[in-house]
Amino acid sequence: MKRMDDRIREKVRQRYAGIATSGTSGCGCSTASCCSPQAPSAKAQSAKLGYSKKDLEAAPEGSDMGLGCGNPRAIAGLKKGEVVLDLGAGGGFDCFLAARQVGPRGRVIGVDMTPEMVAKARENARKGGFKNVEFRLGEIEHLPVADASVDVILSNCVINLSPDKEQVYREAYRVLKPGGRLAISDVVAIKPIPKAVKEDFEKHSGCVAGALHVRKLEGLLRAAGFRDARVRINEQSREFIKDWFPGSGVEQYVRSADVQGIKPGKAGRR
């Protein structure tokens, strides 16, 4: 099992390193038929996910890579002065938008396991003049972040890629302050995923094969300690998911969803 987990991580790392260095968008898949010049641009994809024109214009050029499956900031309720952590930050798109919301007294930390992505995000921060954003190299199962130091955790279509999601949510709980909250967009399973799909490495790195069933995910959140844990499915996501692996039928099994939870305790003053 450990060997399989390591292979999944390596395949994911290779795929996203390639995206970072090529400058192409991810399109949520790893097949040429969907990640082609005819595929929608990253900005067009993000607009479909609920990002405003103002959002798309505010982020540094090249930070929006079309890798999301939702808009976690829309459910985060970010406030001035908060500390935000983005799991799997990619080119930094959500980090830069969050930085504008929390203001100069706030801070945003992006963590990514791919050196090429971290380098790209740091360069985007330099180009955009963002002083309250930093990017750290690390795995989301072993976050390079101190205990109880974060107000809000964001993540956009990343946790499904992890072969140890239970550990991801334990780490999220560890680094959140009492009263801290999760605001995550991710892919979830709505029915059992066929074995042939689950064993396909391309569909792992394409955000499908590793998706947890909604009920199991809710159980993991509660087991990690989160209260008010809820997973809200976006049925409309079927329309863009069917383009990730055209003709494969994966849209029968998975959907995008908003994932939320709160770490018990009273939030401290900022």
Image (spheres, helix red, strand yellow):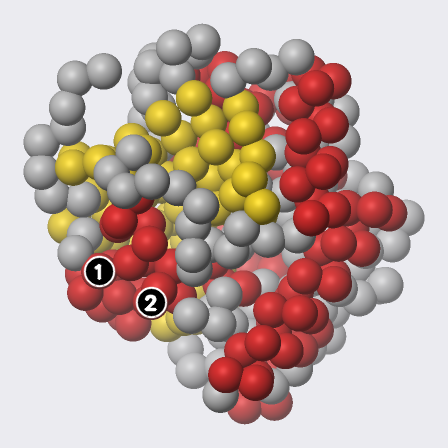
Residue 218, percent from left and from top: 25, 63
Can you give x and y, in whole percent of width and height, for residue 217 in the image?
31, 65
Which residue corresponds to the image point at 61% horizontal and 32% vertical from the top-left? 93
Residue 206 in the image: state x and y as whole percent.
Answer: 65, 65
Q: Specify whether 205 is left or right of 227.
A: right
Residue at left 27%, top 42%?
Answer: 147
Q: Nearer the viewer, residue 213 or 50?
A: 213
Per the image, the residue denoted by label 1 is 224
What type is the residue that disc 2 sits on? Glu
- Tell me if residue 37 can be seen: yes
Residue 38 in view, yes or no: no
Rendered image quadrant of residue 145: top left
Q: Which of disc 1 and disc 2 is earlier in sequence?
A: 2
- Callout 1 amino acid: Ala
Mark 2 lies on residue: 166
Q: Nearer the viewer, residue 146 or 190?
A: 146
Q: Is residue 6 above or below residue 115?
A: below
Horizontal relation, residue 75 to residue 264: left or right? right
Secondary structure category for the residue under label 1: helix
